[in-house]
Image (cartoon, rainbow, N blue to C red):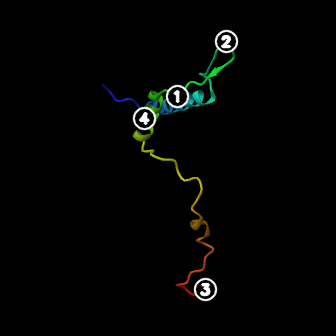
Amino acid sequence: MSRASETILEELHNTIAETLKTELKRYADGDYDETDDDGIVTKKPIPASLIQSTIKYLKDNGIDRPEDEEPDPEDLLAGELPSFGEEV
């Protein structure tokens, strides 16, 4: 049995990522919420299995936390500070 091509594996990988993202977004947006006859909305929680699958997918792909969105203030100022060990 031959191995699937890299293109097919990449497409499958991307499809799984998009599916997980789409399903999480649908729950967050309330697409699965139910409204009873009195107009009361019952918020459907994200199923634990979907959360677990997403966490496993991220972990399997080496993603354990988001990147820092904001740079460290010290890094921003590093170029502006004088160097005391060198002559200016």
Q: CA distance from mark 2 to mark 3?
A: 77 Å
Task: Compare marks 2 and 1 and give the one earlier in the sequence.
Answer: 2
Left or right of 51, for residue 43: right
- The kind of residue on which mark 3 rests is Val
Residue 26 in which image quadrant: top right
- The kind of residue on which mark 1 rests is Ile
- The kind of residue on which mark 2 rests is Asp
Q: Residue at position x 46%, y 29% from top?
A: 48
Q: Mark 4 falls on what kind of element?
A: helix
Q: Are marks 2 and 1 in contact (CB under 8 Å)?
A: no
In front of the other: label 3 or label 1?
Answer: 1
Task: Compare marks 3 and 1 and give the one earlier in the sequence.
Answer: 1
Q: Residue at position x 41%, y 41% from top?
A: 59
**Residue under numbered circle 2:** 37
Q: CA distance from mark 4 to mark 2?
A: 51 Å
Q: Are marks 3 and 4 in contact (CB under 8 Å)?
A: no
The mark found on residue 88 in the picture is 3
Task: Compare marks 4 and 2 and give the one earlier in the sequence.
Answer: 4
Q: Are marks 3 and 1 in contact (CB under 8 Å)?
A: no
Task: Compare marks 2 and 3 and give the one earlier in the sequence.
Answer: 2
**Residue under numbered circle 1:** 46
x, y percentage for residue 16? 48, 30
Determine the residue located farthest toward the bottom in the rendered image: 87
Q: CA distance from mark 2 to mark 1?
A: 23 Å
Q: Nearer the viewer, residue 13 or 45?
A: 45
Q: CA distance from mark 3 to mark 1?
A: 59 Å
Above/below status of 84 relative to 17: below
Residue 3 in which image quadrant: top left
- The kind of residue on which mark 4 rests is Glu
